[in-house]
Image: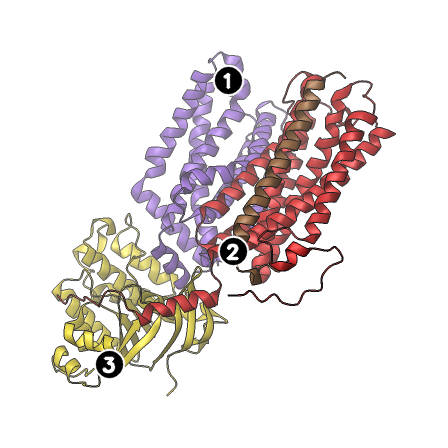
Chain colours: A yellow, B red, C purple, D brown
Amino acid sequence: MEPIVHFRAAVALLGRFPALAGIDLDVMRGEIVLLRGPNGAGKTTVLRACAGLVPVVRGEATVLGHDLRRNAAGVRRRVALLGHASALYDELTVADNVTFWGRACRARPDDIAAALQLVGLDGRLRDVRVGRLSAGQRRRAALACLLARRPELWLLDEPHADLDHEARDLLDRLIRQAVDQGATVIMSSHDLDRALALAHRIVTLDAGMTADQRAAGAGPGTPAEALRGDGEATSETTAEVSHVA
Amino acid sequence: MTTTLPPRPAPGAARDEADAARPATTASPATRVLGAAALVATALLVLYGLVISPADREMADSVRLMYIHVPAATYLYVGCFFTTVASAMWLRRRTPGWDALAEAGAEIALVFSIITLGTGSLWGRPTWGTYWTWDARLTSTAVLTAMLVGYLALRRLELDPAARSTRAAVLGLLLVPNVIVVNRSVEWWRSLHQGSTLVKLDPSIEGTMLVALMVGFVAFGLIFAWLMVHRFRIAWLDQKADGLDLEAALAARRAESRAPTAPETEVTP
Amino acid sequence: MWRDAALVAGRDLRIEARSRVTVHQVAPFALLVLVLFAFALDPARSILERATPGLYWITVLFSALLALSRSAALDETAGARDALRLSGLDPSGVFVGKSLAVAAELVVLEVLLGVGVIVLYGAEPAGVGLLAATCLAATVAVAATGTLYGALVSGLRVRETLLPLLLLPVLAPVLIGATRAFEAALGRAPADGWPWCGLLAAFAVLYSVAGALAYGTLLEGS
Amino acid sequence: MTHAGYVAAGWIGAGVLIGGYAVTLVRRGRRLARQVPPGERRWS
């Protein structure tokens, strides 16, 4: 089955800085991949590269059949990126924001309403200005914008940040639902417990390259055991990870 | 580490010290010849402009400023033309050479515009009693100078190289159209109020005065070329110096991984 | 393209409606400038009367600068730029939408200033057809140029000071054209005002096309 | 030589400006050329 995301020694530039210095990554449809690694390892850049927002100048890079080196813009309509900076307008209400971004990518009105309802913002908060929302609620609004797009590839940059416990459960449930419906998810996260429970595979990045890839038992086992159970700690970074987790 | 010099056919002129190691400069045999020619032409210009050519009947000696003013104004527009063409080519080809040429063109155009404004107002003072006669050409040159200052400010302030080149190229592309629109509207605006002062600016000139003006064009042309070559090379070096080329940057980036810095201190909530 | 333009224009105008910046801050500023001009040039009927077109358009230009930098600030953050590129909105649609939104705000401003000039400077409106056409052409010209140059400076620390430096020289012909057209209209010789209005219209078309083409490149650029 | 002052100001001003700019270009060129390996400089 042909991979959704295929990077082979891909180099991506941020200005002149080679944020991705020859990365190899393959993601199959319906997989949930967790990106791990120190700050500056290139996690966010991988996500933005998959969205066609960062120029790939060397190696192979195809996402959903689009060759990023030739036509990066082609893939954008079929993916969604939930980044740190949310593109929400403080003066507008939640409904206005989600409607704007929804209709911007040709989402149907009922998709938009459903998205709002799914993230629990269709009640009192619906007509509150985004400027007055808490960080968690803003993140839910950004999530609603993502849901309205019904993307094939979810690119989540530390999605659990700022979310309260209940919102994290909601997010996990939404991710599982989307994957069941054939979506694929790539996410970076510092919330290990939840991320490991979700992820089918863990990719550790270091200095813009893939340092290590391992399948994580997505089963009910507690994340810590799942990790330690692997045994074949190849590079020292993995040993560190298991020690820390 | 001996720098192995690629075999270079030694040009005619004997350059012993240059053969030993490449001199760290933006000069080259071509620019030295160009520089020499420019100096000779400038000397000729001084000779003709100040000594040989007679004073004008009406404007007396202040007409000698014209031998600088008109050529400077001409090469000001040539510089803007370079910038716009180079910006258009950069938008199509995205090669750094065009970006460097656009920057060089604008900066040198700014130098010539200052000269044009200076000599223009100095010329106005004795002839019409005021430094600034709101003459159509001088006014539009002033507006053009402001545009050039804006263009160079944008280049200096935008730090991300990729964004800088793209934005400067769009601004540079609009430079000549803007100049044309401004010139037309200023010309039109001035013609409303008084007959075009063009006639007084370019008195009928012949004989040695005409020669002086021609020498002025040649001298300024050589100076313009010399400045362009050097400024282009500086822009070229700028790109190379501030951004190591891809290989070196990649090597540095990969080196980071072999010696991971702080161990991963992930704090699980 | 026009669908996206309408969407973006709607968004910008709704933000303006919610935040009321133009109505509560830019408009009073504009009227205040008219009053300051009166302080600067003593309000003896002759000077202000004669200079009315020029003062009017200078005030419009400066107010436009405020409205334009606010409009540019909306799509300023890295998050907004990424979202716009990802959203599948046609960049020229975004440009046209933003320009229309700013143009709408400017028209409101110009009408308000028109009343201000009539009251404060005692100008008698004449040749209203020419006045309206000039206002329209000049407004579109300023909005299109401003939106394009706003994108040029977005993301820079010093964009508030760089935008006027880049914009005002380019808008000089608009100031000249609009002022002359107004002079012709108020001076009851509208015949020679129309060519100036033509210049403004040409300027507006030039920059609307340039903006529509270049906006996508600028959005992708950084 | 009437208006000698204005003519002198114009000529000397232009000379100083161009000369000064040329000198800064050459000096800046030298400084930058030292930082970049010879291979990069396709001229000299």
Residue type, mark 1 in image: Leu
Question: How far apart are labels 1 and 2 at the CA level?
Answer: 53 Å
Q: Chain for mark 2?
A: B
Q: Are marks 2 and 3 on the same chain?
A: no
Q: Residue furthest right?
A: B207
Q: Which residue is mark 1?
A: C48
Give the structural element (helix, strand or loop) at label 3.
loop
On the image, the x and y values in percent for residue B85 come to 64, 52
Residue shown at the point (70%, 23%) measured from the top left: D7
Q: Which mark is residue B239?
A: 2
Which mark's residue is nearer the viewer, 1 or 2? 2
Give the structural element (helix, strand or loop) at label 1.
helix
**Label 2 environment density (alpha carbons within 10 Å; few <14, some 14–19, many ≥20):** some
Q: Nearer the viewer, residue A67 or C100?
A: A67
Does the CB distance between marks 2 and 3 fall below 8 Å?
no
Say which quarter of the image contains residue B112.
Answer: top right
Residue type, mark 3 in image: His
